[in-house]
Image (spheres, rainbow, N blue to C red):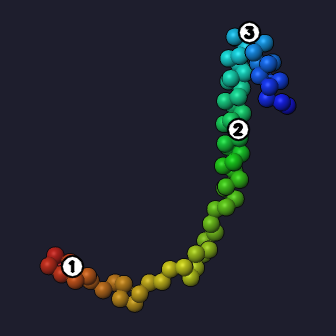
């Protein structure tokens, strides 16, 4: 639908109905956001999908020099 035609139809409505149209537009916007969110849920990472991205050094558990005085 052409935006100009939609605008003309909206302007021809009484004020009380314009409020209803505004509410309906907000409803449609929230519906579109939810739909967009549902599409991103499918992109959730699977367990083990980051395998190989990180390495832990062999001396990981070794106490740090900076904390010797506190130990």
Give SS at disc 2: helix
Residue at 27% across, 83% down: 63
Question: Residue 34: x percent and y percent?
Answer: 67, 43
**Residue depth check, mark 2 versus mark 3: number of the one nearer the observer:** 3
Front-lying residue, 58 or 7: 7
Q: Which residue lies most toward the left here?
A: 69
Which residue does the numbered mark 3 point to in the structure image?
14
Residue 9 sits above or below residue 40 on the image: above
Label at residue 66 = 1
Q: CA distance from mark 2 to mark 3?
A: 26 Å
Residue at 22% across, 83% down: 65
Q: CA distance from mark 2 to mark 1?
A: 53 Å
Q: Are marks 2 and 3 in contact (CB under 8 Å)?
A: no
Question: Residue 15: x percent and y percent?
Answer: 69, 10
Label located before the other in sequence (1 or 3): 3
Question: Residue 23: x percent and y percent?
Answer: 68, 24
Q: Report the side of 64 relative to 59 (left or right).
A: left
Which residue does the numbered mark 2 point to in the structure image?
31
Front-lying residue, 2 or 10: 2
Residue 10 sits above or below residue 55 on the image: above
Categorize mark 3 by other alpha carbons within 10 Å: few (<14), some (14-19), many (20+).
Answer: few
Task: Check the picture and name the quadrant holding the C terminus.
Answer: bottom left
Classify residue 40 by image quadrant: bottom right
Categorize mark 1 by other alpha carbons within 10 Å: few (<14), some (14-19), many (20+).
Answer: few
Classify residue 19 by image quadrant: top right
Label located before the other in sequence (2 or 3): 3
Q: CA distance from mark 1 to mark 3?
A: 73 Å
Categorize mark 2 by other alpha carbons within 10 Å: few (<14), some (14-19), many (20+).
Answer: few
Q: Which residue lies most toward the bottom here?
A: 58
């Amino acid at each position: 639908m052409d935006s100009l035609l939609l605008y003309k139809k909206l302007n021809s409505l009484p004020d009380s109905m314009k409020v209803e149209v505004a509410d309906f537009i907000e409803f449609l916007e929230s519906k579109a956001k939810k739909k967009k969110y549902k599409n991103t849920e499918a992109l959730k990472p699977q367990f083990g999908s980051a395998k190989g991205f990180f390495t832990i050094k062999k001396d990981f558990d070794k106490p740090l020099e900076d904390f010797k005085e506190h130990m």
